Amino acid sequence: MRIIFILLSCIALQVQAQYDSLWQRQQQLQRNGMYVLGSWALGNIAVSSLTANGVSGSNKAFHQMNVYWNVVNAGIAGATLLIRSKRLEGNAVVRQQHRIEKILLLNSGLDIAYITAGAYLQERSRRNNSQQLKGFGESLVLQGAFLLLFDGVMYLLHNQQGRRLGVPANISVGATTHGVGLLVQL
């Protein structure tokens, strides 16, 4: 009976160690990601702030939008780095893993919407001969493309980390009767 108790205790400790490892890696990935986002934001703010005053037309609008957009990015990165997450244990860590992945996929969809909106503004600027719409559109395409790359890489890193530690995938790609589909289990 003692052997069984000792064996079950060892297994429980091993499982908890895996949850702890996953939680710590989630936190480190989030911090690293926010450093990347914050660096991108601060770099854009610095370059575009300095450049906006020396240019005109669509270039001025481009740099103005870069500043506006990246003030928000810097705020998100800064707030995320300042707020400490409550330590999770057990299955809550796995649920958090799935939640992070879903948020990153949702963000990727929003990023595509930003790129599309930017392309729309550029097209509209041709019809209206608006330098401001052209510059704003170019900025949205650039910022959306960066965020799409960022969210895609963050998703892949989180997903890879979860799979390495045995977290079952909640997203799969497969053939359907209408073609290829992406299945997200909620």
Image: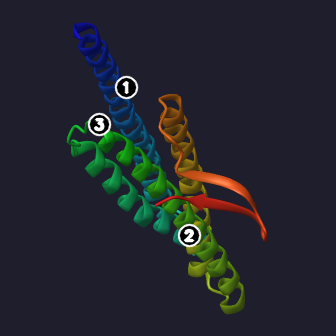
Q: Residues within 10 Å of mark 1 (few under 14, many from 20)?
A: some
Query: Could you say whether the residue bearing mark 3 is in a helix, strand or loop?
Result: loop
Mark 1 or mark 3: whose residue is earlier in sequence: 1
Taking depth in this image into account, of 21 and 119 the one nearest to the observer is 21
The quadrant of the rendering that contains the N terminus is: top left
Mark 1 or mark 2: whose residue is earlier in sequence: 1
Query: Could you say whether the residue bearing mark 2 is in a helix, strand or loop?
Result: helix
Q: Is residue 43 above or below residue 134?
A: above
Determine which residue is flagged by label 2: 114
Mark 2 or mark 3: whose residue is earlier in sequence: 3
Specify whether 131 is left or right of 66: right
Task: Determine the CA span between mark 1 and mark 2.
Answer: 38 Å
Q: Position of residue 158 (x, y in %)?
A: 49, 40
Task: Identify the residue at image location x=24%, y=15%.
Answer: 5
Specify whether 161 is left or right of 4: right
Taking depth in this image into account, of 12 and 104 the one nearest to the observer is 12
Taking depth in this image into account, of 145 and 71 the one nearest to the observer is 145
Q: Is residue 71 visible?
A: yes
Task: Determine the CA span between mark 2 and mark 3.
Answer: 37 Å
Instruction: Please give the count of numbered marks on the rendered protein.
Output: 3
Determine which residue is flagged by label 3: 90
Q: Is residue 103 above or below residue 168?
A: below
Q: In the image, what residue type sits under mark 1?
A: Gln
Please identify, in this view, whether the residue under mark 1 or under mark 2 is nearer the observer.
1
In the image as oriented, which residue stretches furthest toward the top?
3
Q: In the image, what residue type sits under mark 2?
A: Tyr
Q: Is residue 43 above or below residue 1?
A: below
Q: Is residue 11 above or below residue 65?
A: above
Circles 2 and 3 in contact, beta carbons < 8 Å: no
Determine which residue is flagged by label 1: 18
